[in-house]
Image (cartoon, rainbow, N blue to C red):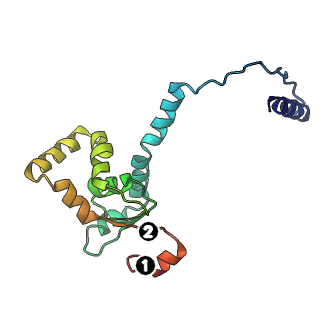
Amino acid sequence: RKQLKMERTAFMATLSNKRIPVQQPIENDVKMKPSKSSNRKKRTQTQDRHKRFVKWIIEKFPHVMNDSNDEGGKHILDVASGKGETAARLSMCHQIKVMMIEPRLSNVEATYKSKVLSKLPIKWQQRMEAHLVEDPDFISNKIQSLVSHIYMCFTDDTVANSIYLQ
Protein backbone atom coordinates (compact mmCIF):
# COMPACT_ATOMS: atom_id res chain seq x y z
CA ARG A 1 0.00 0.00 0.00
CA LYS A 2 2.80 2.40 0.89
CA GLN A 3 4.62 1.42 -2.27
CA LEU A 4 1.54 2.38 -4.28
CA LYS A 5 1.40 5.75 -2.52
CA MET A 6 5.06 6.40 -3.28
CA GLU A 7 4.57 5.47 -6.95
CA ARG A 8 1.53 7.75 -7.20
CA THR A 9 3.45 10.63 -5.58
CA ALA A 10 6.34 10.16 -7.97
CA PHE A 11 4.00 10.01 -10.96
CA MET A 12 2.17 13.19 -9.88
CA ALA A 13 5.54 14.93 -9.47
CA THR A 14 6.47 14.12 -13.05
CA LEU A 15 3.15 15.51 -14.26
CA SER A 16 3.57 18.79 -12.45
CA ASN A 17 7.29 19.10 -13.24
CA LYS A 18 8.09 19.36 -9.56
CA ARG A 19 10.60 17.19 -7.89
CA ILE A 20 9.20 15.53 -4.81
CA PRO A 21 11.58 13.26 -2.96
CA VAL A 22 10.22 9.75 -2.69
CA GLN A 23 10.52 8.43 0.82
CA GLN A 24 11.37 4.86 1.51
CA PRO A 25 8.87 2.99 3.68
CA ILE A 26 9.81 2.81 7.32
CA GLU A 27 9.62 -0.54 9.02
CA ASN A 28 7.05 -0.72 11.83
CA ASP A 29 5.60 2.62 10.84
CA VAL A 30 3.25 3.78 13.60
CA LYS A 31 0.33 6.01 12.73
CA MET A 32 0.08 9.05 14.91
CA LYS A 33 -3.18 9.90 16.59
CA PRO A 34 -4.57 13.33 15.80
CA SER A 35 -3.63 15.84 18.42
CA LYS A 36 -6.19 16.93 20.97
CA SER A 37 -5.92 20.52 19.77
CA SER A 38 -7.12 19.56 16.27
CA ASN A 39 -10.09 17.69 17.76
CA ARG A 40 -10.85 20.66 19.98
CA LYS A 41 -10.77 22.98 16.97
CA LYS A 42 -13.23 20.77 15.07
CA ARG A 43 -15.54 20.68 18.09
CA THR A 44 -15.60 24.44 18.46
CA GLN A 45 -16.33 24.86 14.77
CA THR A 46 -19.36 22.58 14.93
CA GLN A 47 -20.39 23.35 18.49
CA ASP A 48 -22.22 26.55 17.67
CA ARG A 49 -23.57 25.56 14.25
CA HIS A 50 -27.16 25.60 15.53
CA LYS A 51 -26.68 29.06 16.95
CA ARG A 52 -25.27 30.34 13.65
CA PHE A 53 -28.03 28.61 11.66
CA VAL A 54 -30.77 30.17 13.81
CA LYS A 55 -29.13 33.58 13.41
CA TRP A 56 -29.10 33.07 9.63
CA ILE A 57 -32.80 32.09 9.63
CA ILE A 58 -33.72 35.22 11.59
CA GLU A 59 -31.68 37.45 9.26
CA LYS A 60 -32.92 35.91 5.99
CA PHE A 61 -36.57 35.44 6.99
CA PRO A 62 -37.45 38.27 9.40
CA HIS A 63 -41.16 37.99 8.55
CA VAL A 64 -41.30 34.65 10.40
CA MET A 65 -40.72 36.49 13.68
CA ASN A 66 -43.90 38.54 13.21
CA ASP A 67 -46.13 35.88 11.65
CA SER A 68 -45.22 33.10 14.07
CA ASN A 69 -46.99 34.68 17.03
CA ASP A 70 -50.34 34.95 15.25
CA GLU A 71 -52.88 32.16 15.64
CA GLY A 72 -52.34 29.87 12.66
CA GLY A 73 -49.13 31.76 11.87
CA LYS A 74 -46.11 30.44 10.03
CA HIS A 75 -43.94 27.60 11.24
CA ILE A 76 -40.35 26.69 10.63
CA LEU A 77 -40.22 23.16 9.27
CA ASP A 78 -37.17 21.43 10.76
CA VAL A 79 -36.54 18.27 8.73
CA ALA A 80 -34.08 15.75 10.19
CA SER A 81 -34.07 17.74 13.39
CA GLY A 82 -31.96 15.32 15.40
CA LYS A 83 -32.02 16.11 19.11
CA GLY A 84 -33.91 19.34 18.48
CA GLU A 85 -31.36 22.00 19.35
CA THR A 86 -32.40 24.23 16.45
CA ALA A 87 -36.05 23.85 17.45
CA ALA A 88 -35.19 24.62 21.08
CA ARG A 89 -33.33 27.79 20.11
CA LEU A 90 -36.06 29.01 17.75
CA SER A 91 -38.89 28.32 20.17
CA MET A 92 -37.38 29.34 23.50
CA CYS A 93 -35.13 32.20 22.41
CA HIS A 94 -37.18 33.69 19.57
CA GLN A 95 -40.75 32.46 20.26
CA ILE A 96 -41.07 30.94 16.77
CA LYS A 97 -43.29 27.94 16.12
CA VAL A 98 -41.34 24.93 14.90
CA MET A 99 -42.54 21.69 13.36
CA MET A 100 -39.90 18.98 13.68
CA ILE A 101 -39.88 15.97 11.36
CA GLU A 102 -37.65 13.22 12.69
CA PRO A 103 -38.06 9.43 12.65
CA ARG A 104 -36.51 9.11 16.13
CA LEU A 105 -37.76 10.41 19.44
CA SER A 106 -36.15 13.56 20.72
CA ASN A 107 -36.51 15.45 23.97
CA VAL A 108 -36.39 19.15 23.08
CA GLU A 109 -36.78 20.21 26.71
CA ALA A 110 -33.75 18.17 27.83
CA THR A 111 -31.75 19.46 24.86
CA TYR A 112 -32.64 23.04 25.73
CA LYS A 113 -31.64 22.58 29.37
CA SER A 114 -28.39 20.74 28.62
CA LYS A 115 -27.09 22.41 25.46
CA VAL A 116 -28.76 25.78 24.95
CA LEU A 117 -29.50 27.29 28.36
CA SER A 118 -25.92 27.21 29.61
CA LYS A 119 -24.69 29.02 26.47
CA LEU A 120 -27.20 31.86 26.66
CA PRO A 121 -26.16 35.25 28.01
CA ILE A 122 -26.29 35.53 31.82
CA LYS A 123 -29.16 38.00 31.56
CA TRP A 124 -31.31 35.45 29.69
CA GLN A 125 -30.34 32.69 32.12
CA GLN A 126 -31.47 34.85 35.04
CA ARG A 127 -34.81 35.56 33.33
CA MET A 128 -35.32 31.86 32.79
CA GLU A 129 -34.54 31.16 36.44
CA ALA A 130 -37.14 33.77 37.45
CA HIS A 131 -39.74 32.12 35.19
CA LEU A 132 -38.92 28.72 36.67
CA VAL A 133 -39.36 30.04 40.22
CA GLU A 134 -42.86 31.22 39.33
CA ASP A 135 -43.75 28.13 37.29
CA PRO A 136 -41.53 25.02 37.49
CA ASP A 137 -43.08 23.71 34.26
CA PHE A 138 -42.42 26.92 32.31
CA ILE A 139 -39.92 25.40 29.86
CA SER A 140 -42.05 22.33 29.27
CA ASN A 141 -45.21 24.37 28.69
CA LYS A 142 -43.44 26.81 26.38
CA ILE A 143 -41.94 24.06 24.27
CA GLN A 144 -45.26 22.20 24.07
CA SER A 145 -46.98 25.34 22.82
CA LEU A 146 -44.35 26.20 20.19
CA VAL A 147 -42.83 22.89 19.05
CA SER A 148 -44.68 20.05 17.38
CA HIS A 149 -42.93 16.82 16.51
CA ILE A 150 -43.95 14.48 13.72
CA TYR A 151 -42.31 11.08 13.94
CA MET A 152 -41.80 10.02 10.32
CA CYS A 153 -39.28 9.76 7.53
CA PHE A 154 -39.41 12.67 5.10
CA THR A 155 -40.07 11.12 1.68
CA ASP A 156 -42.24 12.13 -1.26
CA ASP A 157 -44.92 9.59 -0.30
CA THR A 158 -45.09 10.63 3.35
CA VAL A 159 -45.29 14.30 2.41
CA ALA A 160 -48.08 13.67 -0.09
CA ASN A 161 -50.11 11.62 2.42
CA SER A 162 -49.45 13.52 5.66
CA ILE A 163 -52.39 15.55 6.92
CA TYR A 164 -50.01 17.60 9.10
CA LEU A 165 -47.93 18.78 6.16
CA GLN A 166 -50.87 19.58 3.86
Determine which quarter of the picture holds residue 121.
top left
Image mark count = 2
Residue positioned 26% across, 71% down in the render:
70
- Extreme-front residue of the structure: 28
Please state which amino acid type lies under the numbered disc 2.
Met
Taking depth in this image into account, of 81 and 131 the one nearest to the observer is 81
Residue 21 vs residue 155, the one in the foreground: 155
Q: Is residue 60 above or below residue 10?
A: below
Name which residue lies at 41% across and 49% down.
50
Q: Position of residue 141 (x, y in %)?
A: 19, 60
Mark 2–mark 1 contact, CB under 8 Å? yes
* Crowd around label 2: few <14 · some 14–19 · many ≥20 (10 Å): some
Q: Which mark is residue 24?
A: none
Foreground of the two, 89 or 58: 89
Task: Determine the residue positioned at 30% across, 67% down.
Answer: 68
Numbered circle sitting on residue 152: 2
- Determine which residue is flagged by label 1: 162
The C terminus - image quarter: bottom left
- Residue at the limit of the structure toward the left, as seen here: 134
Q: Position of residue 48 (x, y in %)?
A: 42, 43
Amino acid type of the residue that numbered disc 1 sits on in the rendered structure: Ser
Neighbour class for label 1 at 10 Å: few (<14), some, many (≥20)? few
Is 65 on the left-hand or right-hand side of 60?
Answer: left
- Which mark is nearer the camera, 2 or 1? 2
Q: What residue lies at 46% left-to-right and 60% top-to-bottom?
A: 80
Quick one: SS at disc 2? loop
Distance from disc 2 to disc 1, alpha carbons, whole Å, reads: 10 Å
Judged from the image, the secondary structure of the residue bearing numbered disc 1 is: loop
Q: Height in image: 98 above or below 44?
A: below
Q: Where does residue 155 sit, x and y in percent of width and height?
A: 52, 71
Q: Reading the chain from its start, which is encountered first: label 2 or label 1?
A: 2
